[in-house]
Amino acid sequence: MGYPSGGIGVGLSTLARLAIQPDRRLAKSMTALGDSRVAIIYLDPSRRNRCCRSPVNVANSLLGHRITIGDTFGVSGDRTDQMLARLPAAIATGAGLLYVQGGVNNIGQVASGFTYNHAVTGEQVTVDTVAAVAMRDMKQIADTALRAGMTVIIEQEVGAETINTSEKLAALNNYRTMLADYAERTPGVFLHDAYPVVMQPGATTPTFRSGYSYDGVHLNGRGAFWHGKSLATLLDRLVAPRLVLSRGVLDIPANGRRQLLTNHLFMTGTGGTAGNGVSGDVPANWSAAMGANVGSATLSSVANPDGVGNGLQAAITYNAAGAYTLTQTLAGTSAGAYHANLRPGDEVEGFALVEVLGGAASLATIHMELNGSSAGAGGTSFGSIDMGGPQATTDQGLNDAALLTLRTRRVVLPAATGGYPYLIASIRAVAFAAGSATVIVRQAGIRRRAAA
């Protein structure tokens, strides 16, 4: 059998003679394994729609989407021992990065008189042994991934507000210390600890900072934003930058049909459609609108810092929860043909660069949607969302200045099945309550990807 190399510069011929397989995993690709805090990377079982409650998604957005996040393996309620069953599937994705988070459910299920049986060994786990057992599981996960040629990022366990007894606090502190010691002495394993960022360090039991969690266990969009900003500092050192945005004004449909939207850099600042609640100039080929009874938005053109194109600034006043939406539709014909920029079988993804100015305390999420159908009525729907999420009163989102790169997962245009097949790109600034926000869309487009 072969073993992955450690990447130490040994020649391929030497590796072949020794039956050692060179590590061919891509550092910019990531999979994840864990509990509900990993499951929230995606909003849906088909893994088409990424959620703003995930620090991984936030970090990637802040880093310009340099990481490709594929299939992930988080299951709500799982302990570390139950995660072991999905480890082979995570390794089989071929990802170069494995992000792991788990342990809170182990500790949550034990106390004086309460135990659980380990899913693999069958042993009875108590509050006195839970830290060591969880650490053993996490070490097995990380060591196995390392042998497969992956880099491992372990998210330090911050706990939950339900961990509030002395015996559970002791287990939590023991587990945290064991994780830290393991990461310090293990090459290829990196530990990220968000406790100082999302929790109140002065509290005597695990307590989220105000407005950072919707239930005392899980982060909302605001908590994920600050957690993600911290995580981005680590990922920035592990993954090289790459450009996923438009390169400039040459990136138009006529030049190879690679970027498919018209006026994606807002070079033509007028001629679009101002919908409900919108005043000011809308760029050509675009529509802007507020939701019914949501509020108003005043649009203006601002220079982009790189000197390429213009940004579309929206000064938004929300009278209630709802959304401001910027949209371009590639509509097909009554004869059942897609828009001239599209072809059945195209593999496409949406992308956008969005800047949020500081003080936008009422935002729940800034997200991009790429939606379509094989017919205007009765067709097959398809699509993807990046950084979507709920807008309940407990779903506060980012409340600081940020520059976000949005990028949907790839979707394939099916054959047209009726009249007016379409593809729509939308950027939405969603508020969970009344308030104000200033949002600048610096660019937005649809990229046709090369066939694999």
Image: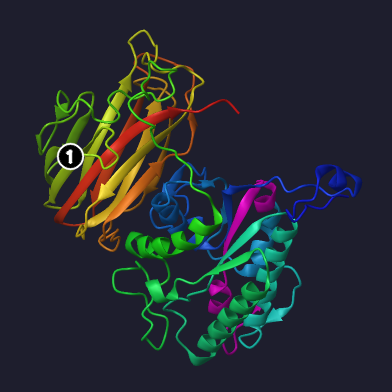
Q: Is residue 117 left or right of residue 72?
A: right
Q: Which residue is mark 1?
A: 302
Residue neighbourhood size for the residue with mark 1, other residues' Cα within 10 Å, grouped as few (<14), some (14–19), many (≥20): some
Q: Is residue 404 visible?
A: yes
Q: Position of residue 167 (x, y in %)?
A: 54, 90
Give the x, y percent position of residue 412: 50, 27
Residue 174 vs residue 11: left or right? left
Q: How many marks?
A: 1
**Observer able to see residue 117:** no
Q: Magenta region: which residues?
A: 89-118
Quarter of the image for residue 445 reads top left
Q: Residue at x 35, y 51 (%)?
A: 389
Amino acid of disc 1: Val
Q: Is residue 164 above or below residue 139?
A: below
Q: Quadrant of the C terminus?
A: top right
Where 77 falls versus 422 (above or below)?
Answer: below
Q: Residue at x 17, y 25 (%)?
A: 272
- Residue 26 inside the magenta-drawn segment: no
Q: Secondary structure at mark 1?
A: strand
Residue 396 drawn above or below residue 51: below
Instruction: Give the x, y percent position of residue 327.
Output: 26, 32
Q: Nearer the viewer, residue 297 or 23?
A: 23
Residue ID at (64%, 84%): 126
- 333 vs 19, nearest the viewer: 19
- Along the line of sight, which residue is nearer the eye, 217 or 269? 269
Q: How is the image coloured?
A: rainbow
Query: Furthest residue to the top?
Result: 335
Question: Residue 375's spot in the image, x, y percent?
Answer: 38, 19
> Above or below — where is 100 with respect to 418?
below
Q: Is residue 107 magenta?
A: yes
